[in-house]
Image (cartoon, rainbow, N blue to C red):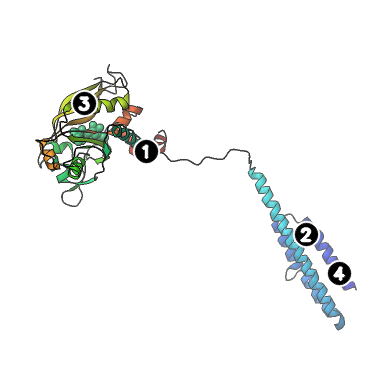
Amino acid sequence: METYETLRTIEQDALAELAEVQDEKDLDAWRVKYLGRKGLATQAIKRLRDLPPEERPAYGQAVNALKERLQHAFEERQEALKQRAMEAELRAEAFDPTLPGRRPPVGRYHPSNLILREITDIFKQMGFQVFDAPEVETDEYNFELLNIPAGHPARDMWDTFYTTNEGQLLRTHTSPGQIWAMRQFAPEPIRVILPGKCYRYEQVTPRSEMMFHQVEGLAIGHHITFADLKGTVVNFVRQMFGPERKLRFRCSHFPFTEPSVEVDMDCILCGGKGCRVCKYTGWLEIMGAGMVHPVVLRNGGYDPEEYTGFAFGMGPERIAMLKHGIEDIRYFFSNDIRFLSQF
Ligand code: FA5
């Protein structure tokens, strides 16, 4: 019976020690000590040899039962330790369910898109529809059909990026869109605006980018006069910049309009007195415009004896710069979130 006494002692010691175990390392040492290959409970089977044969099966069963109980106790302790570690971790994180949640950052429109939307909304009220034209153009559409033949000095002003395909280029202005729109609608009267990207091979400065947007406007019909152009532009500028704005139409030249003008607005910062923004002139240039040249009308499919039209082209980034007091156009496309998130 002494043999069974030993088993009981092993069990009591093992359970007492197990209750003291506080971490994984001690737990593992305990397992080796009692349940490992050379562990006390495992080795207890060796006593079988000292017993008479008829008692051996009962003793064998008693050893196995002991090992099972110890194994069970081990697993329970292991689970309890895991649970305790998890609770400690949660406490350390100090989760407070009453705090408000964190808002995920929400995307927003790019300032160029915002100003394009404002511009198109104003023209939509005046019956203009938005027309989409390609950014990758041909020499024919970007220049030839707009009355700018090869060798024309105006080509210097509108130098661009060429593709490896002969005669294919990135458009320098939205004006080739006039031809696309005319060819789609002629001989119906039209009123369209064409917002989109343009590209120029020129030095990047605080006022000029290599890639920027333009919004082209085109109206063609019977009896359209320069007065219609003035009325449309005045209405646009006053809705965009306020009803007190004054406008000036200054003689200019574009090969695709005749007569041509540059439209200036009194400086919104100094009200016309002269300041750094308007370079002390009191005026800010906001667009080029004019009456559609007869050659361009014909290229678009309208008979210039019967139809007249006006066109204009403006730079929305420059308009946004005036509206929001932005000093450098390069902010628009340098992808700095500190700038973009202000709109
Ligand atoms: C033109 O591009 C003409 N196609 C405009 C036009 C259309 C005249 C229809 C008559 C009839 P201009 O090169 O001046 O003109 O450009 C028009 C506007 O685009 C400028 O007033 C400016 O706001 C903007 N722009 C021109 N170049 C740049 C640039 N490098 N960076 C940013 N904006 C520019």
Pinpoint residue 29: horizontal percent, then vertical percent.
73, 62
Q: Residues within 10 Å of mark 4 (few under 14, many from 20)?
A: few
Q: Residues within 10 Å of mark 2 (few under 14, many from 20)?
A: some
The residue indicated by pointer 4 is 6
Say which residue appears at 84% left-offset and 69% top-offset: 7
Report the mark closest to the observer, 1 or 2.
1
Q: Is mark 1 within 8 Å of ligand 1?
A: no
Report the mark closest to the observer, 3 or 4.
3
Disc 3 and disc 2: Cα gap in Å? 95 Å
- Element type where label 3 sits in the image: helix
* Image quarter hosting the C terminus: top left
Disc sitting over residue 230 in the figure: 3
Pinpoint residue 163: horizontal percent, then vertical percent.
21, 49
Residue 35 appears in view: yes
- Element type where label 1 sits in the image: loop
Image quadrant of ligand 1? top left
First reached walking from the N terminus: tag 1 or tag 3: 1
